[in-house]
Amino acid sequence: MSQVIELGSAKVRHEESRSDRLPEPIDLEESGLEQSERVEQVSMAFLVALQRLPPPERAVLLLHEVLDFEHEEIARLLGIAAPASRKALERARCNLANERRMLLTSREEHRRLLETFLRAVNGGDVQEIVQLLADDAVLVTDGGARGRTFQGVRNLSQPVPGPARIASFLVAISARIANVLQPEMRDLNGQPAIVFRSGQETIGALLLAIADGRIARVFFHGDLDRLRHVGPPTA
């Protein structure tokens, strides 16, 4: 068996524009942002869904719902008709409806599921992990445009769908690297998350999206360039 666990081609790993790149994980306090920021605007699930929208829909959504522009103003800025702006907003809202469903979980429930999930992964309990995951759960890892290897394990170049596949993969990886990582509970993108460190070095960040009491998305961020806003270890 190869010493490097790797899925996908080198070509994919070198594509900065690939559709499953993750936005930066952000510690709002470290970044000087208000904790009162709407979670909807900074959560990892929402930002991932936002960047996958077609550019016209994304532009209209941000201008209208984040910057409070009227459709007539948006039409002038984008060079489209006001009815087209309204239609683009309608499509964007429809495309984001499922991700908005992942913003209803309380902080307490989010933290509890995160801690339970981490214990199950570290304990190698595939069955418990499967039970924690939604039927349509997806795992996305991001090691940067060129990919990243840590302790002989390379980040996945494609998302992993399905509870059974996600659980098997995470247990296999945890058995190889868990003993060299120190997990730390932090708030990232307005929600509880886990930052993994090796000594003083930040290795990655684990963020979840939860809907209806189960984990719908698992995000593992290992891109060092985009981990710069995570902040140093807490005392």
Image (cartoon, grey):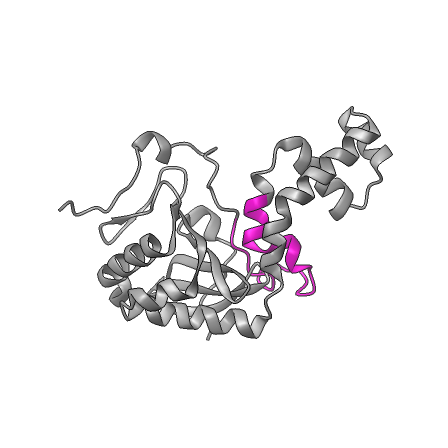
The count of marks equals: 0
Tell me what residue is drawn at x 83 percent, y 30 percent.
Answer: 82
Tell me what residue is drawn at x 44 percent, y 65 percent.
Answer: 194
Q: Is residue 41 magenta?
A: yes
Residue 141 shows in the view: yes
Closer to us: 127 or 58: 127
Image coordinates for residue 147, horizontal then vertical, percent: 35, 41
Image coordinates for residue 7, horizontal then vertical, percent: 29, 41
Closer to us: 184 or 108: 108
Left or right of residue 126: residue 49: right
Left or right of residue 45: residue 173: left
Tell me what residue is drawn at x 30 percent, y 32 percent.
Answer: 10
Q: Main secondary structure of the magenta part?
A: loop
Left or right of residue 124: residue 108: right
Q: Quadrant of residue 34?
A: bottom right
Taking 79 as reference, is 44 above or below it? below
Stretch in magenta: 24-49
Image coordinates for residue 219, horizontal then vertical, percent: 45, 54
Q: Return the residue found at the far top.
A: 79
Residue 234 shows in the view: no
Q: Return the residue found at the far front.
A: 135
Q: Return the residue found at the far left.
A: 1
Image coordinates for residue 90, horizontal then vertical, percent: 73, 40
Q: Is residue 160 magenta?
A: no
